[in-house]
Image (cartoon, helix red, strand yellow):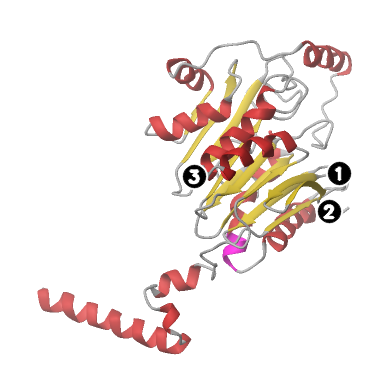
Amino acid sequence: MLLLTKVVKLNLLDSRRKFLKLFGGTALVGLSPVQLACTPNYNKDALNKPLVIATWNNYKANEAAWEVLQNGGSALDAVEAGARIPEADPNDQSVGYGGLPDREGNVSLDACIMDHLGNAGSVCYLKNIKHPISVARKVMEETPHVILAGDGALAFALEQGFEKENLLSDQAKEKWLDWLKEKNYRPEGNRDQHDTIGILAIDQKGNLAGACTTSGMAYKMQGRVGDSPIIGAGMFVDNEVGAAAATGVGEKVLTTLGSFLVVELMRQGKSPQEACEEAVSRIHRKLKSEENIQVGYVALDKNGRFGAHSIQKGFEYTLFKPETKTKFAASFIQ
Ligand code: GLY
């Protein structure tokens, strides 16, 4: 048995030597053939770091995240701090407090967070808690689970010390009452109707993290859960490769597992921009002519290179890196 193990080990070593010879270079020593095949060649000292990128004009969210990154804090702390800004903003009607409700007038929130070790936490259909992103982080850190939903998520949040509050602002209530007159549901997902925040960061150590938080599609059916709390759909982080986040009509992102797709495309060698373009076009190619849908992605790789793309005009992203702090219009198809 011992002999057999030795023979197998020697054979493996032999194929590894052949592999290294084939691909040359002493720089490759130390990495197994499997790692070499799957991990793009990233610079250990990321070109752009620290860096934070967020969907839409989330300047204040980036400021909060930047404060953490600049002081040497982790990407995880940065994205949580950033996501909490629109969650508390009554004027942001797509995230947290002030978010537009479902058809019955309930504000129900979805959020997820992921760190550089591949740990993730998520809450969906969470009501009456202003900061779902922080509850998601608690799910990640304090439970053996990844996702908690509905009443269970609420009970857990209360147990963790979060306060129960009314999230339906007067402004959102007024819009909902107006919507009830015609009850016309238009899942389009663009600036005025929907702007989920997805926020990705790389910290001074070169580690990545991401967060995504939303009140979901305005006037959705009660109980509807979108892409935002689903790891790999609304957001995904792989510290070997990069991170991605989505905004727009969640059903389209869910059925293509969009953020995971963007990261995997980067793993295969595409730049963050090319990866976003391919993921958007996979959705676009299948759209029916009557569908007027917006979906946008932001992506960040391990070198601190970034990209963003959307189906329609109007999608913006906000980027902070040492020499740039501004929002940009993303490229688009239509
Ligand atoms: N993208 C967020 C949602 O559809 O709920």
Q: Does mark 2 have its CB less than 8 Å from ligand 1?
A: no
Q: Would you identify the image quadrant in which residue 303 lies?
A: bottom right
For the record, the magenta segment spans 264-268
Among numbered discs 3 and 2, the one appearing first in the sequence: 3
Q: Is residue 213 above or below residue 269?
A: above
Q: CA distance from mark 3 to mark 2?
A: 29 Å
Q: Secondary structure at mark 3?
A: loop
The residue depicted at 79 percent of the width and 56 percent of the height is 285
* Dots 3, 1 in contact, CB < 8 A: no
Q: Is residue 324 above or below residue 36?
A: above
Tag 3: amino acid:
Asp
* Dots 2, 1 in contact, CB < 8 A: yes
Provide the residue designation for mark 1: 314
Main SS category, magenta section: helix
Among numbered discs 2 and 1, the one appearing first in the sequence: 1
Q: Residue 112, how many percent across, how many down?
A: 56, 36
Among numbered discs 3 and 1, the one appearing first in the sequence: 3
Q: Nearer the viewer, mark 3 or mark 1?
A: 3
Provide the residue designation for mark 2: 332
Q: Residue 274, how many percent across, how many down?
A: 72, 63
Q: Secondary structure at mark 2?
A: strand
Q: Nearer the viewer, mark 3 or mark 2?
A: 3
User: 10 Å neighbourhood of mark 1: few (<14), some, or many (≥20)?
Assistant: some
Residue 318 vs residue 13, the one in the foreground: 318
Does residue 215 appear in the picture of this structure?
A: no
Provide the residue designation for mark 3: 115
Q: Is residue 104 above or below residue 38?
A: above
Q: CA distance from mark 3 to mark 1?
A: 30 Å
The residue depicted at 57 percent of the width and 61 percent of the height is 46
Tag 1: amino acid:
Gly
Q: Secondary structure at mark 1?
A: loop
User: 10 Å neighbourhood of mark 3: few (<14), some, or many (≥20)?
Assistant: many
